[in-house]
Amino acid sequence: MNKNLNAFFALIIISISTLFSQNIQSPSTFLGYELGTRFTNHYKVVEYFTYVSTSSKSVKLEKYGETNEFRPLYVSFISSEENINNLENIREDNLKRTGILKGESNSEVAIVWLSYNVHGNEASSTEAAMQTLFELVTKKQDWLKNTLVIIDPCINPDGRDRYVNWYNQIKSTPYNTDTNAFEHREPWPRGRANHYLFDLNRDWAWASQVETQQRLKVYNKWLPQVHVDFHEQGYESPYYFAPAAEPFHEIITTWQRDFQTQIGKNHAKYFDKNGWLYFTKESFDLLYPSYGDTYPTYLGAIGMTYEQGGIGAGLGINLKNNTVLKLTDRIKHHFTTGISTVEMTSKNTSKLVSEFKKFFDNSKLEYKSYILRGEENKINQVISLLNKHEINSYPAEEKAIKAYDYYANSVKTIQTSSKDLVIPINQPKGKMVKVLFEQEAKLSDSLTYDITAWSIPYAYGLQGFASQTTIEANKNLLISKEFKNEMNTNSYAYLHKWNEVSDATFLGDLLENNFNVRFSNSDFSLEGVHYKKGTLVVMRGENEHLNNFDEQIVTLANNLNTKLTAVTTGFVESGTDFGSSNYSLIKSKKVAALAGEGTSSLSFGEIWHFFETQLKYQLTVINSVNLNRTNLSEYDVFILPDDYTANKDELEILNSYLSKGGTIISIGGSLNSFADKEGFALKTKKDTLDKPKPNLIPYNQQEREYLKTIITGSIFNSTIDNTHPLAFGYDNFYNSLKLSGTSYKLLENGSNVGYFSENTKNISGFAGSEALKQVPNSLLFGVENKGKGQLIYFIDNTLFRSFWENGKLFFANAVFLN
């Protein structure tokens, strides 16, 4: 009788719950228009997710952050009511599988995370997210008994609303399907990127953006077994879904490969039934670690990218096959793959969680420890990055070990010390450590979608070692991360080092607070301490105009947790005294950068982000359409982003600015404005490319033949003239991330501050055989004097994606020391 009553009450509860779910409004009903007949602003998407979470006991909504433009970031948890009530236990159980938490996992609930709209103008996926939420809550409760679905409906709200607001302002009524219509030609900077115009799909590993930093905190709390990143591509392209293309990184398991294929076959079943076009195993590889598919993959998930044709399609557009691609179609396709992914997760929960647990066994990895050695602030930058990913690191114990030396390219015996940083493989995220720190990733195929080199020791300018020995932590070492300077009212001057980008932040603060600051043009010694070129010297006698001189400079330094050295004399022991002309006065700089049509929005965004978040120094942005109406002589430094090419009139403006004493910093493709032009020293290097040859390459081999002429993000060792102010703070060599196969001759008139020597070669990453021939004896950083001004050439972009930290001081030198 009791069993019957229990069954009866359970049936009533299920019936009430089902009825409750059926009463939830669909997105179309809630919004007041059919999904796909207009684009939904982000705040309305949030309203719908909030509404469902308050209407269903199977949903929990959590705010995890806020964008630069103050839009909220949310994730939604969807599962059975029982699972939602037990979320914390499910989370802890899952982390026990990884070893992050101690103990055995007692549940078999798989976690699938669906991420939408990382690129703002790939806008169909957020619409599909609402439909997917509705379907799961109202019709797919059986799948949710053993599955937790996490939906991030919009990773990039700032970019999405930039696109949606523009489209809603200019679209025709009814919408125009003509490919030439304005509504299909989005203006600069377009909605793809976030506020700072960064591509958030390339930021997972580097976490330079606030959206990524906040997302990682919640992602690392859950570590799903399946993660999908929803995208769009050109509107003529069919739908793309897993399995991915080669190259796969070597740590990706057989299971991760196989289950991608199983999911792809399940998608294909639905697409075949509807006659929808699709492709797999092409274009989108699994190598570069900072994508929304690779980063989760390196943390044990089945990480996948889904791509719907549709960028620029608006509400509908004519295709070459005489059909119209509608937003409603795009939503339907993303909805189908999303639901299919949840279906496959639910059907394979046991296998998913067991294989996920196996992934975190790192015993077969060759190296057991990675060791970093170098400048303390650079080490601290790496620690900060690792903390964002919850990866452990610690000071080394003193020990003699054998290790592979990245610089020497050989195994040797080294003596570790407490100043060395150890990143052990024996931790849950050991495979991610391998990916981020390995000197070179193995390539099963050279045809890749992105850069092929990123090793952290090179990116941060640190000496790197890899050892097969486990190195223990130095438990006796107490690390103090806070440094407090004290005022010395008897000091003659305060000195500050100059060897990494935070030093430039301090200089910027000094200049904006009206300090007179000088830098040394040569090494010197004082009071038993050796100081290198570039050292900042702030003398009391030159700053008598400042009230509370000591208090102000000490406060600025303490705010940045950076060390000042007070000295009581300007009479040096070696080198030149502080009154010498060898100490150049640094004037406050008024800096401008070009933006707008004709420039790379990503490159401009990197400049903008660098000034606002790292230098924290005023930058004036000039729209390219207003260049001929701008008095550039008001600015000391003018920065040209990548991809900009000056026309004849603009080149005259720039030349006039230079002749009157201005400084131009030219990055990447903007060098085309000056290369091979009369009156400029920069010449393109075309030693072998100038020789025309008949094209006898078979058509189906031409794409791979083209690879011979390109460099896709490869690391080259360069020679640096560190006697030049542009290179102060550097050794006589520098590992540069080369992003292009274009090379330039060494300057005959000017300073070759950085260059690739005759014997240079790439030390990590792919470079085409023909492109490699152009690199030796080519320019990296150059300075050309023009009239009273100077033109500074950056062949490689040191601000690229804000992750090549070791290159940023070159840029700061160009702004402040030249």
Image (tube, helix red, strand yellow):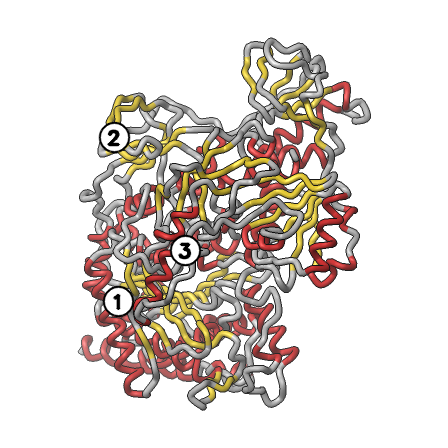
Residue indicated by mark 3: 710
Between 589 and 25, the one lying in front of the other is 589
Residue 32 in the image: x percent, y percent?
56, 85
Q: Residues within 10 Å of mark 2 (few under 14, many from 20)?
A: some
Q: Decide if residue 755 is in sight here.
A: yes
Tell me the mark number nearer the camera, choosing from 3 and 2. Answer: 3
SS under mark 2 = strand
Question: What residue is at 33 percent from the left and 34 percent from the top?
Answer: 406
Q: Residues within 10 Å of mark 3 (few under 14, many from 20)?
A: some
Residue 730 in the image: x percent, y percent?
51, 31
Give the vertical position of 132 relative to 764 (above or below): below
Residue indicated by mark 1: 260
Question: Which badge, 3 or 1, is on the more N-terminal residue?
Answer: 1
Residue 221 in the image: x percent, y percent?
38, 53
CB atoms at circles 3 and 1 under 8 Å apart? no
Give the vertical position of 339 relative to 364 (above or below): below
Extreme residue toward the right, this view: 545
Tag 1: amino acid: Gln
Give the vertical position of 580 relative to 64 (above or below): above
- Alpha-carbon span between mark 3 and mark 1: 30 Å
Tag 2: amino acid: Val
Give the vertical position of 650 relative to 474 (above or below): below
Residue indicated by mark 2: 411
| Quadrant position of residue 574 | top right
Q: Which mark is residue 816?
A: none
Say left or right for 736 vs 597. Answer: left
Question: Which badge, 3 or 2, is on the more N-terminal residue?
Answer: 2
